[in-house]
Image (tube, rainbow, N blue to C red):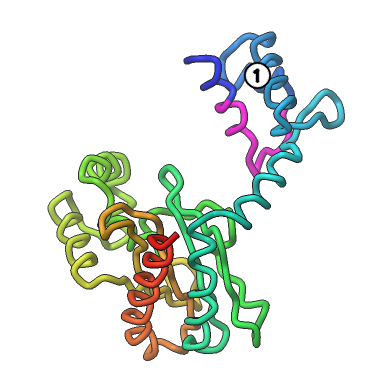
Amino acid sequence: MAGHDRTISVLKLFTIDRPVWTAEKVAEALEVSVSSAYRYVAILVEAGLLTPARGGSYVLGPAIIQYDRQIQLTDPLLVAARPVMADILRYAPSHSVILLSRMFEDTVLCIDQLVDGTYPTAEVSYARGRPMPLFRGATSKIMLPYLPTRDLRRLHAAHAGEIRDAGLGEGWDEFRKALTEMRRRGYVITYWEIDPERIGIAAPLLEDQKRLLGSLSYVIPKSEQDTAPRLGPLLMAAAREVEVRLAED
């Protein structure tokens, strides 16, 4: 693996479960020499992506915070979506949350969350920056029909059991049929697949009606089950408005 790829691999070792690493442990995890590990770490420290901690260890650095602020202020999808999210929140039941999400590798990340102001502690599992499963929950499922066939085949080959358990089909043909139906409808509703007292409703965000950008979703209380079907078309219209704003930019 090229040196720059190794450097990125070092950065990926830093997780919530294991946020602190030494160069020696990096070398062990990546199966490289300790001198190489120190070189990769030094590059990341110089870039501000890692910073030294106690005992010769390292943690994520201040540049991560700087880049996060820049994303919050300048990301075109965030800038386009936030006014629309604020507008459609008023049509949701009390205690609802609106999510803006993107795919990242084989997971889904919430990149923004808007909570009903009358109930600011309406927590949901889709917290900003937390990797979530690709095959469970409306927020994730609605993205699947818009992936290239080669990616879907790879996902099915690697996660057939998860796909089956998520109600998306026993085999490849049933999986494709389920995705075709989602795409035809234009939105997905799931019932307490992620949080036991929550219903998810999601619509895709697309570029030129083709390339997947992410998803826009409501997460509403279980008690509002009868409300869910009317929110699907509203989300579809909101997603189209986001897409128009992006195109105008």
Question: Is 69 on the left-hand or right-hand side of 201?
Answer: right
Q: Residue at x 46, y 75 (%)?
A: 218
Query: Where in the figure is residue 145, as x and y percent of width and height?
Result: 25, 57
Q: Residue at x 65, y 87 (%)?
A: 118
Camera-side residue: 57 or 11? 11
Q: Which residues are magenta?
A: 8-21
Is residue 44 within the magenta segment? no
Q: Residue at x 57, y 68 (%)?
A: 113
Seen as rendered, the residue at the extreme right is: 54
Tell me which corner region of the image, top left, top right, bottom left or bottom right, holds residue 7.
top right
Give the vertical position of 241 relative to 215 (above or below): below
Observer able to see residue 173: yes
Q: Residue at x 71, y 15 (%)?
A: 38
Question: Is 150 on the left-hand or right-hand side of 247?
Answer: left
Camera-side residue: 244 or 231? 244
Query: Where in the figure is residue 110, as x and y percent of width and height?
Result: 52, 59
Give the vertical position of 86 relative to 144 (above or below): below
Q: Give amino acid for label 1.
A: Tyr
Query: Where in the figure is residue 17, as x and y percent of width and height?
Result: 65, 43
Question: Is 153 on the left-hand or right-hand side of 244?
Answer: left
Tell me which corner region of the image, top left, top right, bottom left or bottom right, holds residue 169.
bottom left
**Residue linked to disc 1:** 40
Count numbered badges in the picture: 1
Question: Is 91 on the left-hand or right-hand side of 13?
Answer: left
Q: Where's the C terminus, which quadrant?
A: bottom left
